Amino acid sequence: MEFKFETAYNQEALTVMAKTIRKTARKKRNRRSHIFGVIVIILALLLTLPLGDREFVIDFRTILTWLVVAILIFTLIFEDRINGYVARKRMMPGLDKAVVTFSEDGYHSETEIGTSEFKYNTIMMLAETADYFVFVFSQSHAQVYNKKSITGGTVEEFREFIKNATGKEIQNI
């Protein structure tokens, strides 16, 4: 059985890829980063609030502290989109669209630049979102496959095929 996907590596796909890597391969590191960020936010707010008999003063340090807190909150909320944007900017021209064919012994990817062959044993983790299958290879590398573009079978058939081919369970994100 052969399955084929045609995926555009646009902002949406790269955001899904960043979110999946964050929730799988970088899970522990991400949790520590979020805890550290929340602690910094709380400390910054406590240091600028008038506690005890101190008077509330808006000066350069207070404004700067609040600006840093706002940037930190923005980054924590939109980190997947930011990481997807950075990945898109770093992506080589010609890699923004891939046609991938899956077979029993591996899968074959075609882009404007060329073709690549992959074996299933290089996949570290499998994940699935509402619109994509995601293959995670490391803490900074992954591939996404748009479910809407599947040919050669159904999404359920591909799910079973890839689980059997890799010997790994699919994590829902």
Image: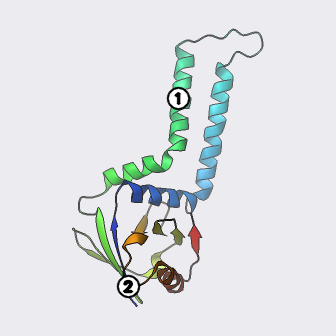
Q: Which residue is mark 2?
A: 152
Which of the two labelled residues, at mark 1 and mark 2, occupies the earlier sequence position?
A: 1
Task: Give the residue displayed 76% in from the left and 9% down from the top.
Answer: 53
Percent x, y for residue 172? 58, 67
Q: Is residue 147 above or below residue 93?
A: below
> Any mark on residue 68, and which?
1
Q: Quadrant of the N terminus?
A: bottom left
- Res. 136 in view: no
State which quadrant residue 168 falls in: bottom right
Mark 2: which secondary structure?
loop
Task: Give the residue displayed 52% in from the left and 72% down from the top.
Answer: 126
The local crowd at label 2, few if under 14, some if 14 to 19, many if 20 or more residues have their Cα within 10 Å, is some
- As drawn, is 7 to the left or to the right of 70? left
Percent x, y for residue 58? 58, 12
Q: Is residue 82 above or below residue 70?
A: below
Q: Is residue 72 above or below residue 5?
A: above
Mark 1: which secondary structure?
helix
Task: Give the residue displayed 55% in from the left and 62% down from the top.
Answer: 25
Q: Is residue 147 above or below residue 104?
A: above
State which quadrant residue 24 falls in: bottom right
Q: Residue furthest right?
A: 52
- Please identify, in this view, whether the residue under mark 1 or under mark 2 is nearer the observer: 2
Percent x, y for residue 65? 56, 24
Q: Quadrant of the C terminus?
A: bottom right
Task: Give the residue displayed 54% in from the left and 36% down from the top.
Answer: 72
Of 137 and 129, which appears nearest the observer? Answer: 129
Q: Amino acid at mark 2?
A: Gly
Of 130 and 73, which appears nearest the observer? Answer: 130
Q: Amino acid at mark 1?
A: Val
